[in-house]
Image: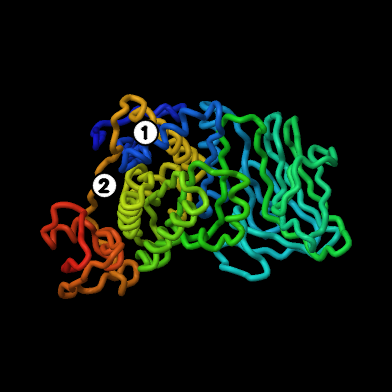
Amino acid sequence: MMRLFFLGCLVPFLGLSQALPEGLKIDTSYALIQGYDSVTLHRLKDQFSRVNQDKLVFIHYGGSHIQAENPTSVARKKFQERFGNGGYGLMFNYKAANSYSSVNYATSCTGNWEYNKSYQGRKVNLPLGICGMVAETTDTLASLSFAMKHGIAANNSKILVLFENDSTSFEVKMTVNGTVLSVPLEVLPQGISYPWNDSIRTVDIQVQARKGGKRFRFYGICSESLASGGVVYHSTGVGAAAFRSILLLDKLPEQAPLVKPDIVLLDFGTNDILFHNRIESSLETEVEKAITLWRGMFPEVLIVLTSTQDLFYKKHTITAGIEFRNLMDSLARTNQCLFWNWFDLSGGLNTIRDWAKLGYAKTDHVHLTKDGYRVKGSYLYESFMNTLNILNSSSNVGEVTVPLKNYSSPVIPLESSPGKPTAPSASRKYTVKSGDTLSGIAGKYHTTVSKLKSFNGLKSDVIRVGQVLRIP
């Protein structure tokens, strides 16, 4: 069995119409979706091989990078051009939640709306749903509107309205392109779906009073083809959301079965490390709980963990991006997940300012520009394709991996603020507990895996319960 693919040379990239500036320092050796066991990789290959007969459904979570749908729109377009259009996926009325909209559609609303977003935490009276947001009104004259900027192509499809469809809910009048939909395809406790076989330019939802109705609690709409094949790509970002936000979606177990995801991308990290330049001790547990949550709902689901891009905040490089990358790689290995190393692919440490100078990142050195997100979305698609090419070239692939880049810059200690490192302290000792990983221990003590291994004379990442490690 082939256990390792190390791509020491550049992977050809055909996703952009023109060559990228060398100043971006992109390393296409990392344009892969990495996998560490044959079972997970075989499942990935099998899902794509059946896409003509069985829909392949992505759901992509993240922060502001994903809410606006800049990179995910590019990835969706490329996947659907290659494998068929299974539907646009989930949309939310961001205006009702007092937030900014997707690049693909504008939203508006009338009436008074209360809302909750995943970064704001749990609210008992406003439980969060699959999109990471919820909007609720008690106004019987309220409405929600969606206007597609380029339209959704005509398809024999269904449009699902996700709302709390119980005895206390108001009724809804659904209008698409000015046509009222009167015959539901399906009525569910989670909402109502309607058939639609034309393009989608506008969607309007009008709240209507009914006896016993007290409120209308909205979770999103979803457009999906009724055909059996093609790719559906749900983009479900919430600005300012950190990794723990995925654990707050209390309605997820009820709503996720309606979209039946095959691949879940957990694309967080920026809001976990940006403000304090460190890995919180709780992060590893949060990631593993998120993995357990999704596998509890869908045992065969493939989970892709990602790293962040290089970040520069308040005149200091966010060196914790290295440790976040290390932690995601380690957790992907130990939990049979896939890993997309965007940190190294996009250039690595101290490169985000180059992206900004060349017009691919904004001057906040956190967010990318439209061109930058186009690069990211294209490379996400290309990374899947490169891995599939490897898997299709042999039936005996056990791993698809690339060694992590080594960066010499120190990681800011927990006790210091960005740019003000504390003096080095004497080494400490740590006793390995069940579930520990080298990456997790390194993150906890704000050092690196390579330093831990060197300090303790370790030849591999394998550690055992009860083992005593010296912390540099």
Question: Which amino acid type is shown beneath numbered disc 1?
Answer: Thr
Q: Nearer the viewer, residue 366 or 33?
A: 33
Quadrant containing the N terminus is top left
- For label 2, the crowd category at 10 Å Cα-Cα, with few meaning under 14, some 14 to 19 and many 20 or more, is some
In the rendered image, is residue 451 in sight? Answer: yes
Label 1, label 2: how far apart the Cα atoms are: 17 Å
Circle 1 — which element? Answer: helix
Quadrant containing the C terminus is bottom left
The numbered disc on residue 317 is: none
Q: In x, y percent, where is residue 412?
A: 29, 66
In the rendered image, is residue 6 in sight? Answer: no
At a point 66% along the width and 50% down the height, the residue shown is 92
Query: In terms of image quadrants, where is residue 152?
Result: top right
Question: Which amino acid type is shown beneath numbered disc 2?
Answer: Leu
At a point 48% along the width and 57% down the height, the residue shown is 293
Q: In x, y percent, where is residue 203?
A: 76, 43
Query: In terms of image quadrants, where is residue 217?
Result: bottom right
* Circle 1 residue: 387
Q: Earlier in the sequence, mark 1 or mark 2?
A: 1
Rendered view: 358 above or below 84:
below
* Circle 2 residue: 404
Q: In x, y percent, where is residue 41?
A: 36, 37
